[in-house]
Image (spheres, helix red, strand yellow):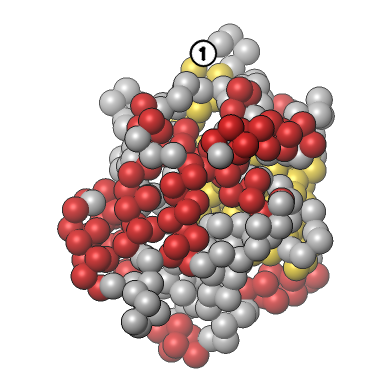
Amino acid sequence: MKNAVTSLLQLLCVFTVVRCPAQTQSPVAPEQEKVAGEQVVTALEGAYGVHPGERRNHTKGTCALGTFVGTPQAAAWSRSALFSGQPLEVVARFSLAGGDPDAPDADRSPRGMALEFRLPNGSLQHMTMINTPMFFAAMPRTFLDKMLALKPDPATGKPDPAAVKVFAASHPDNSAQAAFLAADNPPVSYVNSAYFGIHTFKFINRENKTTLVRWRFVPEDGEKQLSSAELASKPADFLEKALIKRAQQGPVRWDMLLTIGQPGDPEDDPTILWPKDRKELKVGTLTITSAMNQSGAGCEKINYDPLVIADGIAATNDPVLLFRSPSYGVSAAKRLQGK
């Protein structure tokens, strides 16, 4: 079975935008030896069911198209073609975390923004972000254990509260995001949310100087949260309609803000925030010009693997970041087969 999956992924690397493991620009995290991508995908299916042809996570989503213009000043930090100052085509996808295609849009779960940048030389750059500043797992094992804890009890059709409690008590790396989601209501729309890269990356300039960075995209429409009353009264499906309508009214923009790391800042743990006094600068603007249902649209078949990285940007040894590529690959292989 393992060889069959490997062969299928190799074919997908040739015929689709699925990222080949051999092309990843970073070493394999030791933790990956303990948790396999197949395990996590199976656990996601156990938690949310199998929905043939759909993503196993962030299943419910909406496609969008637009452009990105980087600031030439950012070239001081990275030689990436992202920062040429020229407009670049972007295929975006906005989504809800989790594997339920019918999840209510007011759910207290992260929202996602995934971007595929089409660079002038034909290469790609992916950015896969969520609207919480931190992730819930410092290691792949935490992600796996959470999905196992969310598996519904056949008697109730809901996760066993005792299993969820045991998970929370035994995985303190989950606590920061859980507290954020409990304290901050979801955004009123996809366009009224900031999105965070959560992981640390390396920016490499033309002199081969490496700088540790994190990034986030901040909406020009402003950040707005649902009120408690709206949280209880919103229909199950409002995010896609709102995004499409807003894009029809005119361009929707986010500024890309770069945070510059300092020695000692954690680079391998996406659950820990950097100090607020770190230097920040604007390095580009994303403009979304249209949005549409994902069925048959440009984002539908894209595997938004965050390790699809162009020259000038590189991954750190963050074990969760490095694990995402093989797990995304397994999910992509299944859905592209219609499974």
Residue 333 is at least partly visible in this image: yes
Residue 125 is at least partly visible in this image: no
Is residue 325 or residue 232 the one in the foreground?
325
Looking at this rendering, what residue extends furthest in the top direction? 207
> Which residue: 73% across, 34% down?
11
Residue with the mark numbered 1:
209
Q: What x and y, as percent, mark residue 249? A: 78, 71
Looking at this rendering, what residue extends furthest in the front direction? 1
Residue type for callout 1? Lys
Relative vertical location of residue 244 with respect to residue 24 in this rendering, above or below: below
Is residue 78 or residue 239 the one in the foreground?
239
Is residue 116 or residue 246 the one in the foreground?
116
> Which residue: 51% across, 67% down?
49
Q: What x and y, as percent, mark residue 300? A: 73, 56
Question: Would residue 37 appear left or right of 4 to someone viewing this image?
Answer: left
Q: What x and y, as percent, mark residue 320? A: 41, 39
Place residue 305 in its image quadrant: top right
Relative vertical location of residue 167 with respect to residue 107 in this rendering, above or below: above
Is residue 255 or residue 7 the one in the foreground?
7
Question: Would residue 95 appear left or right of 70 to someone viewing this image?
Answer: left
> Which residue: 38% across, 72% down?
152
